[in-house]
Image (cartoon, rainbow, N blue to C red):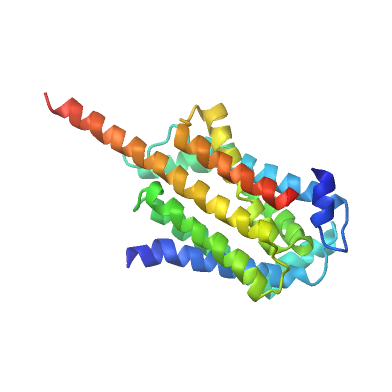
Amino acid sequence: MRIFLYIIMPIITTVCGEFLLKIAVGSTPLSFGWDTLVLLYTSPLILAGVALILLSATLWVMGMSRFQLSFMYPFLSINYVIIVVGSEWLLGEDVRLNRYIAMGLIIVGLVIISKSNNRQIQETAKEISNDTTP
Amino acid sequence: MIISLDLLADSNFNKHVVYILVTALLLRILMDLCFKLSVQGVSFESQPLKSAMIILKSPALWAAIVMATVNFWLWAMVLSYYDLSFAYPLFSICFALIMISGRIFFNESLDAYKLVGIGCILASSAVLVLG
């Protein structure tokens, strides 16, 4: 249940938020001016996307105090899979092989980085147990 | 690098978009460093309320919030030009650059695992831009 609220929910809300944002701004290239700012802060689709991403960030930060980062990091891979596959299926983007390779590299990278935290935590735990056992 | 980004951009390409993309990336990293700076030396466990007050008074926090707002604007512009399946994975480069910045500015540890992970992420960005 906690995993659903603090890890799966942030993933779902981020992905939905990014898709909404892309759908909202994707049809017309934005210019660098006031009209863009007005559009950003008045379009319901964009505001809904931002709200979802903010909700996601809040839940994720709350999750950080409940789970170890090394446990949470690999879950971030799911974001990249859904975004890349979803961009092809839902948005009809031309997703070439290199984007799938990049997605794979990011997943491998995230998993390896999470191992680092594991090791640090284990080392700290070992140090603590060494300190307490004479 | 800019030439390669040119090739990947949509047909209605505007050269300024590359600069916007790079600015958005750099600002995102700067924003995270400011967030980190604002909570430096603060421990939530012992004095949660006092800690919150210290953080709220920190200029770094407000700088980070301003950067977050500007960055949202830049990100929306990036998304309006680039594919989501290109821009979203590309921004994973922030992971790598933030870890490197953490080492430089906050003396955080970078062990072999992190270095290999950073390598994978940098390689993924290269594959996206050059591929």
**Can the viewer see residue A75?**
yes
Most distant residue in the front direction: A97
| Residue closer to the observer: A9 or A125 | A125
Percent of width and height locating residue B86: 69, 58
Q: Quadrant of residue A36?
A: bottom right
Q: Position of residue B22 (x, y in %)?
A: 74, 45
Q: Nearer the viewer, residue B109 or A5?
A: B109
Residue A37, position in %: x, y? Answer: 77, 61
User: Is residue B52 left or right of A85 when viewed as pictured?
Assistant: left
Q: Residue furthest left?
A: A134
Tell me what residue is drawn at x 74 percent, y 48 percent.
B130
Choose between B121 and B66: the one closer to the eye. B121
| Residue A74 percent coordinates (x, y) | 45, 54
The residue depicted at 81 percent of the width and 46 percent of the height is B19
Quadrant for the N terminus of chain B in the image: top right
Q: Is residue A50 visible?
A: no
Does A9 sit above or below residue B52? below
